[in-house]
Image: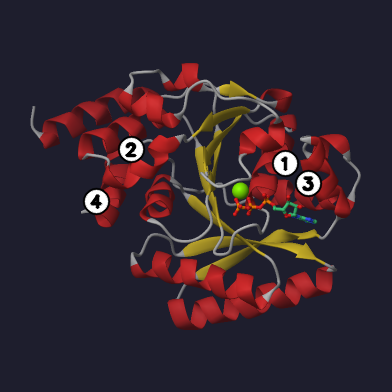
């Protein structure tokens, strides 16, 4: 079968999914340790509580992995799905409130060198997932081909930063690469660990102006998270703060972020065309 024929077949398979509306978000940061994993886990649980069916892809090979924060242990990884014929549905871990998690595993490192066949297979596995309507991809810090490949799978990129200049500069570097490869025109921003709303607003506004002027990228303000000692306490206890401290400052911030996600533009491009995913992949890997 030639490449074009394979693609046509994939498109046919996905005709069945035409009415499925899956939202895929990649969560990234320039600097490490700014709160991505905590944002992903607590937002996922909150979305799930509000009736969404959420899958987390743990694409971070760093130290603060999702399985550690949740206290669950993985059996299979995305690597097994791609190279050992394990079905994506069978590799899913169950987390609090029924969220599902798939660890990237060491195979994620090889995403950069995935053959076109494997890239297609991955796209196809995502598209055929049953019951899942929201996918959050937690990535490692910084820019990698890995990150870019996940961004191509997603309709939305969320960048987490703190108000510190070092974190902002690194966040800007990520945007620069996104702009260079023309991967996204709009990026959502979460400012984490702020002392108050005022600082969150001024930080966002400065970042927005810079991104518009120098990169022609539009930044959406997805919200902020107050600096809250309960976050660290929860990580220590391996219990997400929205469950352990549902009324704490950080939890309230997560609820407002979740509401914004749920009420966001409904016109997001539906991911049901393999061709679209493929076209984007070619841009990065081609
Ligand atoms: N809003 C907050 N208030 C207080 N502490 C926070 C907050 N957000 C994050 N932290 C602290 O920062 C630590 C790192 O958070 P997290 O692991 O979510 O970051 P990360 O961006 O995923 O890191 P990495 O880049 O290593 O993957 C947490 O364990 C917690 O101690
Ligand atoms: Mg992390």
N-terminal of the pair, mark 1 or mark 2, is 1
Q: Quadrant of the C terminus?
A: bottom left
x, y percent for residue 282: 24, 51
Q: Label 3 to label 4, Cα distance in Å? A: 37 Å
Toward the right, the furthest residue is 247
Along the polypeptide, which appears first: circle 3 or circle 4? Answer: 3
Q: Of the residues under marks 3 and 1, which one precedes in the sequence?
A: 1
Tell me the CA gap for discs 4 and 2: 15 Å
For ligand 1, tell me if the residue under mark 1 lies within 8 Å: no
Q: Residue at x 39, y 50 (%)?
A: 146
Check the image and name the residue furthest to the left: 2
Residue 263 seen? no
Quadrant of res 193: bottom right
Specify the label residue 273 is tagged with: 2
Front disc: 4 or 2: 4
Tags 3 and 1 touching, CB below 8 Å: no
The residue lying at 74 percent from left, 61 percent from top is 224
Q: CA distance from mark 1 to mark 2?
A: 30 Å
Q: Earlier in the sequence, mark 4 or mark 1?
A: 1
């Amino acid at each position: 079968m030639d490449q074009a024929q394979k693609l046509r077949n994939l498109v046919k398979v996905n005709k069945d999914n035409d009415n499925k509306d899956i939202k895929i978000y990649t969560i990234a940061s320039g600097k490490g340790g700014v709160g991505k994993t905590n944002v992903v886990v607590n937002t996922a649980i909150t979305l799930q509580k509000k009736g969404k069916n959420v899958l987390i892809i743990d694409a971070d090979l760093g130290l603060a992995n999702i399985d550690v924060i949740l206290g669950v242990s993985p059996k299979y990884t995305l690597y097994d799905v791609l190279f050992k014929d394990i079905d994506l549905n069978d590799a899913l871990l169950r987390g609090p409130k029924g969220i599902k998690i798939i660890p990237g595993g060491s195979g994620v490192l090889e995403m950069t060198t995935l053959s076109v066949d494997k890239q297609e297979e991955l796209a196809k596995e995502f598209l055929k997932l049953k019951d899942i309507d929201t996918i959050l991809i937690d990535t490692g810090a910084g820019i990698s081909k890995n990150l870019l490949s996940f961004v191509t799978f997603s309709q939305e990129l969320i960048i987490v930063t703190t108000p510190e200049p070092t974190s902002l500069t690194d966040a800007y570097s990520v945007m620069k690469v996104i702009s260079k490869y023309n991967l996204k025109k709009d990026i959502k921003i979460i400012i984490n660990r702020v002392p108050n709303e005022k600082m969150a607003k001024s930080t966002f506004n400065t970042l927005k102006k810079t991104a518009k002027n120098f990169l022609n990228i539009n930044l959406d303000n997805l919200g902020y998270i107050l600096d809250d000692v309960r976050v660290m306490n929860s990580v220590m206890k391996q219990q997400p703060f929205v469950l352990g401290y549902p009324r704490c400052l950080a939890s309230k911030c997560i609820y407002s972020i979740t509401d914004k996600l749920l009420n966001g533009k409904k016109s997001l491009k539906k991911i049901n065309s393999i061709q679209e995913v493929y076209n984007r992949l070619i841009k990065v890997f081609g």
